[in-house]
Amino acid sequence: MADVISAGDDVAAASAPALEAASGAAYDIIELLFFAYRDFVRDADEALAVYGFGRAHHRVLHFVDRNPGLRVTELLDILKITKQSLGRVLRELVDKGFIVQREGEADRRQRLLYVTDRGDRLARELARLQGRRVARALVDAEPAERDAVKRFLFEIIDPEERGKVSRLSGFGADGRR
Amino acid sequence: MADVISAGDDVAAASAPALEAASGAAYDIIELLFFAYRDFVRDADEALAVYGFGRAHHRVLHFVDRNPGLRVTELLDILKITKQSLGRVLRELVDKGFIVQREGEADRRQRLLYVTDRGDRLARELARLQGRRVARALVDAEPAERDAVKRFLFEIIDPEERGKVSRLSGFGADGRR
DNA sequence: AAATTACGTCAGCCATGTTGACTTATTTCG
DNA sequence: CGAAATAAGTCAACATGGCTGACGTAATTT
């Protein structure tokens, strides 16, 4: 039961031993990703509940805070949800004064997104909570190990999405700064 | 960035750059975790849809496959969901012949969970899909780097949960095998 | 014998995702 | 210039997967 999984026959351009070693670690990591993410996302929940928000609001607030002037279309492409799903949470964030929308200067069809002071404060508080967990997980890690973690997460992302993530988060296409 | 905002109203002045400088490596990883998990969980979706299953079914199937004879209470504690939520997906998995429940020998109140052959086949297929992604992300990583990734994910988990995860996944409390 | 435990289930609610259809304003292009 | 494309918003209906609360049954523990 639960032995080494096969790496898949279409993994090209890698030596058999390298793939095998990678596959051995893969099963553990599948489970670790589940547990890690399960706990990671819970950090912000109580802080969000104060305003009647959920995780969907958190994601929107986060990306607008990190990318002032973000266009709605770009946000949809980041979150990979539909316009209608975004519409609901975005409206609530605007109604409660955490986000404002401004007409684009160059293109007046656009409604560029910005956080308010209030929104910025909440976004930072949420980032502080999650950042604390991440920082604790990295305290004993050497710089090379931190890079290895970042590179791994970066390479888990769909290849065609990596360019976008690099631009948003500000590190290179190889996962390094 | 801030110059785009022109006449400042209540739009927060210091956003992305200041935050980034303040928080270091943790901030990148918060975003990377979002993107990585977003893509990671999508791998299995089409395979699950064939049987009318969703991600909740996947999680149940996975942990039962990895832990034959799992008790319902233990599964609840792993997934951190309620008995009622589990009940729905578990019933569907049983009805469709992917999981069977057996009365416990020592304690006949227990309904121990096992996958059927069919369930095992689906579980492995899903693991293959996700494992392939993980394996590809690790092909160029050295053993020490793979350990660093595992250790990081392990330490993201709530401290009081780590013992349970160690026992389930079979590596030590330090995140190493 | 009573209390606790393991499990299941009914009923209703909420958050967040989906499709499909349609509108409005604006920009781009032939 | 006029047609087509684009950016954004909205209505309606529905699916998934969480939640709480209340109860029931069988088996075990005290």
Image (spheres, coloured by chain):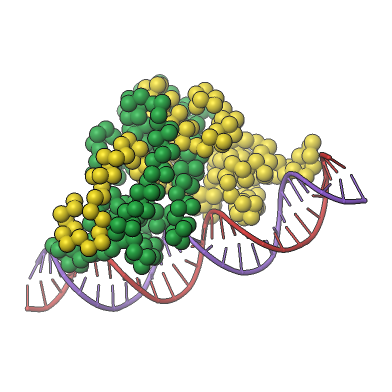
Chain colours: A green, B yellow, C purple, D red
Above or below: residue B168 compared with residue A77? above
Q: Going by the image, does B79 lie left or right of A116?
A: right
Can residue B146 be spotted in the picture? no
Which residue is found at the position 49% from the left and 44% from the top?
A38
Can residue B91 be spotted in the picture? yes
Where residue B141 appears, as percent x and y from the top left, is 36, 25
Q: Going by the image, does A62 lie left or right of B156?
A: left
Where residue A89 appears, as percent x and y from the top left, is 39, 62
Please tell me which residue lies in front, D10 or C30.
D10
The quadrant holding residue B149 is top left
Where residue A123 appears, as percent x and y from the top left, is 35, 51
Please tell me which residue lies in front, B117 or A149.
A149
The quadrant holding residue B169 is top right
The quadrant holding residue A102 is bottom left
Which residue is found at the position 51% from the left and 52% from the top?
B54
Which residue is found at the position 65% from the left and 36% from the top?
B68
Above or below: residue A108 compared with residue B33? below
Please tell me which residue lies in front, A96 or B95.
A96
Please tell me which residue lies in front, C8 or A99.
A99
Above or below: residue A30 compared with residue A25? below
Which residue is found at the position 40% from the left and 48% from the top?
A126
- What is the total number of numbered labels drawn onto the structure image? 0
Where residue A108 appears, as percent x and y from the top left, is 17, 67
